[in-house]
Amino acid sequence: VQLQASGGGLVQAGGSLRLSCVAAGIKINSNARAWYRQAPGKQRELVARIKPDGSTTYGDSVRGRFTISEDNTRNTLHLQMNSLKPEDTGVYYCGIEPRYWGQGTLVTVSS
């Protein structure tokens, strides 16, 4: 099983990025799938999750700005991030909970 995240980069505050996570060896919708992030010196936190029933949950700090979605034909999970803030900076990890995780992609938001 492999999860390959991409789409991170450097963006100015107020900008947007779209992260993608391609799954191989497993169906992306085989269980709850999620994006987490870890900022320097902080614990990993949930950004967004699609539950097995298809409903979504978001972390309080990103609700209304980020959107999680998936393309089952491409076995891919996405995270659309709008109105980015410097505090969104961190490494973003995609995963199929609880067991499978990608390597992370770095998002840096400059002020």
Image: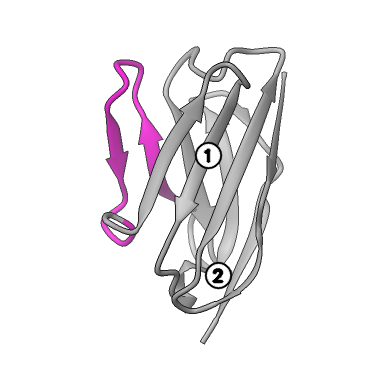
User: Residue 62 at what x, y percent from top left?
Assistant: 34, 58
Residue under label 2, please give it: 41
For mark 1, does the 10 Å Cα neighbourhood hold few (<14), some (14 to 19), or many (20 or more) residues? many
Residue under label 1, please give it: 78
Q: Relative to 11, is 21 above or below? A: above
Indicate left or right for 65 with 100 as reference: left
User: Residue 81 at what x, y percent from top left?
Assistant: 46, 57
Nearer-N-terminus badge (1/2): 2
Q: Which residue corresponds to the image point at 49% horizontal and 45% vertical from the top-left?
A: 79
Q: Which residue corresponds to the image point at 31% horizontal and 62% vertical from the top-left?
A: 61
Which range is magenta?
45-62
Callout 1 secondary element: strand
Query: Residue 91 has which mark?
Result: none
* Residue 97 lies in the magenta-colored region: no
State the CA–CA distance, disc 1 to disc 2. Answer: 26 Å
Q: Which residue corresponds to the image point at 50% horizontal and 71% vertical from the top-left?
A: 15
In this rendering, which labeled residue sits more in front, label 1 or label 2? Answer: 1
Q: 28 or 37: nearer the eye? A: 28
